[in-house]
Image (cartoon, helix red, strand yellow):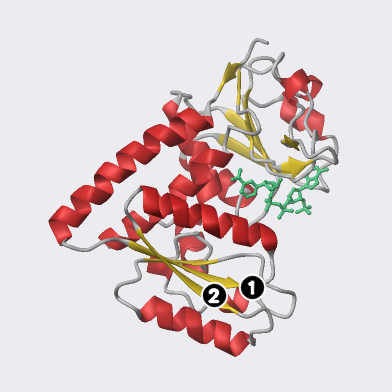
Amino acid sequence: MSALLLDGRQFAQELKGELQAEIAAFKQERGIVPQLVVVQVQGDSASERYVRSIRKLCDNLDMSFRLELLPADVPQSVLNETIATVSADASAHGVLIQMPLPGHLSADQAVMHLDYRKDVDGVHPINVGLLAQGRAALVPNTPAGGMALLKRYGIDLRGKRAAVVGRSAVVGRPMALLLLRADATVTVCHSRTPNLAAVLHECDLVAVAAGRAGLVTGDMLRPGAVVVDFGINVRDDGQIVGDVDFASAVEVAGAITPVPGGTGPVTNVMLLRNVLTAARG
Ligand code: NDP
């Protein structure tokens, strides 16, 4: 093994310590506890696990947590009203619409009822637009965490060639914009990109969010490249693996995030950081 491991677990612990101190200082100064409200529609077991882990993290960091749980057959109008009501509630500083929503509901419609200043997932079109313009915005947690991890390890992105594999609204696209903001020269790849290996070979940094286990292998990388693997894939044997074939990539890369233990642990902490940012106004 040659690459430096970018340890997200260790970093998440550091971030939690910093955030807890900042939350305590905020309470002292303003006399209020920052509150996250999650709007969740019942019926998705992965969502239930995720929301439980967010609640636990809020408890650990002394942040207030409230769940608005809606039945699986909730009509769009009720979901929209719930989001609008929570958005107008001064005690709710951050509002998260838990995805995925059941098939009969439109996430695009729901998001339009959210106050963008409380949009701690960074999905409201105003936040997306602000990020695209390179202005201050609430940024999606997963790419924000990836960037924070790179910064923690002192990885300089200025003038570097970077590729992002994946163009989803929550990971790939915002990651590309964040890399651009950090002065990297960015190429965004997706399922229609011919010869992915040729693109990746030119890059000093490769960030992968494709949801395809082992899509990127060591032979596709430039020696010494920094690899950020956002992928979380559960294999048939229950093992969690990334979108990068770790065994081959670690021999070629200069630095790499493991899966599990890389970008994943940082994501939830970034969510709570956004709640504090939103509470500060
Ligand atoms: P999506 O399915 O929304 O997007 C996947 C993207 O990858 C699409 O843009 C797709 O292209 C592209 N893609 C798919 N196959 C290929 C291929 N063979 N070659 C090149 N590009 C390809 O996924 P998400 O962005 O939501 O998630 C991506 C991964 O990140 C998943 O494994 C998910 O579990 C994980 N994830 C991790 C988080 C974390 O905290 N680390 C948080 C959120 C997600 P196209 O647009 O053309 O279809």
The answer to whether residue 134 is visible is no
- 201 with respect to 169 (left or right): right
In this figure, what is the number of numbered marks? 2
- Disc 1 marks a residue whose amino acid type is Gln
Above or below: residue 48 compared with residue 194: below
Query: Which quarter of the figure is the C terminus placed in?
Result: bottom left
- 60 with respect to 173 (left or right): left
Figure quadrant of residue 15: top left
- Disc 2 marks a residue whose amino acid type is Leu
Above or below: residue 11 compared with residue 144: above
Above or below: residue 273 compared with residue 228: below
Label 1 with label 2: CB-CB less than 8 Å: yes
Q: Nearer the viewer, residue 119 or 197?
A: 119
Residue at disc 1, CB closer than 8 Å to ligand 1: no
Above or below: residue 77 compared with residue 90: below
Disc 1 crowd rating (10 Å Cα; few below 14, some 14-19, many 20+) is: some
Residue holding disc 1: 42
Residue lying farthest to the left in this orientation = 29
Residue holding disc 2: 69
The residue drawn where x is 40% and y is 67% is 118
Query: Which quarter of the figure is the N terminus placed in?
Result: top right
